[in-house]
Amino acid sequence: MTNIKKMLGAGIAVASLLGFAACGSSSSTKSSEPKEAKLTVWAASEDQAKSDSWLPTMEEAFKKAHPEYKITFKNAVVAPPDASKTVKQDAKAAADVYLFANDQLGDLVQANAIGELSDDAVAQVKQQDAEPLIQSVTAQNGKMYGVPFTGNTWFMYYDKSKFTDEDVKSLDAMLAKGKVAFNVANAWYLPGFYLDGNMSLFGEKSNDGKAGIKLSDKAAAITKYLVKLVANKNFVMDNDEGAGLAAIQNHTADAFFSGSWQANDVKKALGANYAAAQLPKFKTEAGEFQMKSFAGSKAVAYNPNSKAARIAAKFAAFLGSKESQKKYYELQNTIPSDKSLADIVKGDPAAVAQMNTIANTSVLQPTIAEMGSFWDPTKTFGTALANKEINEGNAAAKTADWAKGFEAALSK
């Protein structure tokens, strides 16, 4: 466990840079800054369950780093997925600092419940995170809010007794040597085959609703590839009920695609042969493409309505700092988003795979309201693939119908 005093030397310097827009640097602002503050902090129950859990640990570290303040922390259980819903009930009465999932960003900005990052904070996040995570805290107005502390995506687990390091770079090479499971019918996973330049979601920055959802002229070739994949004797159909993990556990599959939430189950099933990697490439009649997963983040924010907004912003910055992420991983195995922490997770296959996937084989999952029109047409299309209703003969027409489904959904 990292010594707190040793940690503060580097960590506080980083956190100090992470000033927020509400936290000006003028002497007049500093002189009027309150010296006492009561900060309410929202986080998941596991983050605060014990006195030595991550959140209380970092609160004590922050107090030691800032003896000029007299801070009383009050913690409450509001997990990141629930932050927006709870904050919006009354932004002025909500927590001073909270953790949130980035797909809530638009709602939080609209509710005036999240503070904008300052120039220093923007520079820090850009230094700290891969591009998809930088974009994950960039709102439709082009401004940045919140500091990512972990990513969210899916990657590949595999049995390393079946596949070499070179094999796992190619899905086709893997299918030639072992059995691979994939959830074709799931609308979060299926796009992984189309996102390497063959599916455009709401413009270059994924935040232009008017740009819509477009499929390239090579998308039909990818659909044909998927038809062949589903028919391959070495393909195992995963589903939302966990068929892929079950196949790994009973050794009827040698690889499958999921996220860090299933790392412990996969590790238990594969034992010494447990491995994970970023996504592979695959070859179609239209060329070779890289599988790419949707990525997002969980981040730390402060409430601009706080009575002690400046101190809240400093603490939010501290919670998102490199050293805080390091402590989070050490205490609770939360995979950091900070690229410079790659060395501390190098013995953790899932953590390495997640960080590599976000950096190299992912795209930002759009968070604008129009993204709601994406899921149903994609699930319908994926289900048709899984049920073998799509074949090589009708692949082009079915792909065109999928594109029309997006247009129809967006026009409602």
Image (spheres, rainbow, N blue to C red):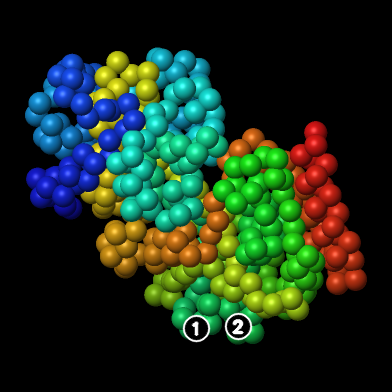
Label 1 secondary element: loop
Q: Against 187, is 245 above or below?
A: below
Residue type at the position of mark 1 = Glu
Q: Against 184, is 150 above or below?
A: above
Residue shown at 48%/41% (left/top)?
138
For label 2, the residue is 173
Residue 294 picture quarter: bottom right
Please indicate whether residue 365 sits to the left or right of residue 381 in the image.
Answer: left
Image position, residue 260 (x, y; %): 46, 56
10 Å crowding of disc 1: few (<14), some (14-19), many (20+): few
Is residue 179 visible in the rendered structure shown here? no
Relative depth, front residue between 214 and 89: 214
Please indicate whether residue 15 sits to the left or right of residue 360 in the image.
Answer: left
Q: Against 191, is 213 above or below?
A: above
Image position, residue 113 (x, y; %): 44, 24
Label 2 secondary element: helix
For label 1, the residue is 166
Relative depth, front residue between 112 and 37: 112
Relative depth, front residue between 164 and 295: 295
Residue 34 picture quarter: top left
Q: Are marks 1 and 2 in contact (CB under 8 Å)?
A: yes
Residue type at the position of mark 2 = Ala
Image position, residue 290 (x, y; %): 60, 70
Residue shown at 72%/56% (left/top)?
185
Residue shown at 40%/32% (left/top)?
116
Quadrant the C terminus occupies = top right
